[in-house]
Amino acid sequence: MATFIERVRTATPTRGTFLNLGSALVAEVCALAGFDWLLVDLEHGAGGEDALVGQILAGAAHGVPVVARVESSERIRVGHVLDLGALGVMFPRLDTPEEVTNALRHLWYPPRGDRGVAGYNRARSFGGDARSSSEVNDAILGIVQIESVTALEHVEAIAAIDGVDVLFVGPADLSTSLGVPGQLDSAPFLAALERVARAAHGAGKAAGILTGDPAATAWYHDHGFSFVSVASDSALLRAAAQHAANPDPKEHP
């Protein structure tokens, strides 16, 4: 059976969700729900790095991999979430190939990158991990967000960078940058999606996106987006809570 990393790198369709409540119990609920992966949002989420381990453990208990979106691309931030056991990192708001190249270096041990070498952390089995540095480097997922017109203008060059596994569209930021905030069916936004998918596939990489509509997942898969996040833990809870509090009377006899 293909590993999670292999599935992502071969653009096999997967479905995940963002975790922004900072709760290990909520992470476990999402893992049990059947998602292929979970992404802890340290950029906009309520929980910080102190809550990351619990969420990683909740996913691991049910065989669901967990990656993290860092709040910045600083070396110390990237290295810390990896040392805690995240299987990959999502980088927000990188606009140029130079920014992407510099950020990705923080994923890997030297000489490929500049991640601090420490073998006694959780990710390295507290000293029991016999893998070489290159083996560890190869097992880390690199996800770069495309969230601005500038990033879109450089998307082909970004896709070609070694270590970029997924080009991930941030719909809210990208549509705003395009001048059509929230208009995800507008011509400029749809053209941007097509360009991102084409750039990813041309470089042998995967394309990803966040959608608030679970029913839209199939459409995105059909249009070249294999790494699809369905909303977030808080959005899914809010929708379920609203439905429970205000049920449609037509649904009951």
Image (cartoon, rainbow, N blue to C red):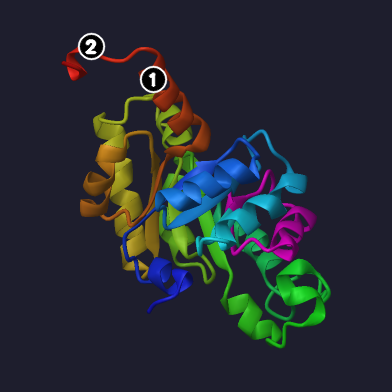
Expressed as whole percent of the image width and height from the top left, the position of residue 145 reads 50, 48
Q: Quadrant of the N terminus?
A: bottom left
Local packing at callout 1 (Cα closer than 10 Å; few below 14, some 14-19, many 20+) is few
In the image, what residue occupies the spot 59% across and 37% down? 20
Asked whether 239 or 222 is in front, the reply is 239
Asked whether 146 or 166 is in front, the reply is 166
User: Which comes before the other along the chain, label 2 or label 1?
Assistant: 1
Query: At label 1, which amino acid type do we have?
Result: Ala
Label 1 sits on a secondary structure element that is helix
Q: Which residues are magenta?
A: 68-94
Expressed as whole percent of the image width and height from the top left, the position of residue 26 reads 57, 41
- Give residue 92's quadrant in the image: top right
Distance Cα–Cα, label 2 vs label 1: 11 Å
In the image, what residue occupies the spot 37% across and 34% down? 212
The residue that disc 1 covers is: 244
In the image, what residue occupies the spot 38% across and 20% down? 244
The residue that disc 2 covers is: 249
Q: Which mark is residue 75?
A: none
Residue lying farthest front? 253
User: Can residue 93 be seen by looking at this rendering?
Assistant: no
Local packing at callout 2 (Cα closer than 10 Å; few below 14, some 14-19, many 20+) is few
Answer whether residue 115 is magenta in the image.
no
Answer whether residue 75 is magenta in the image.
yes
Q: In the rendered view, does 110 fall on the left or right side of 23?
A: right
Query: At label 2, which amino acid type do we have?
Result: Pro
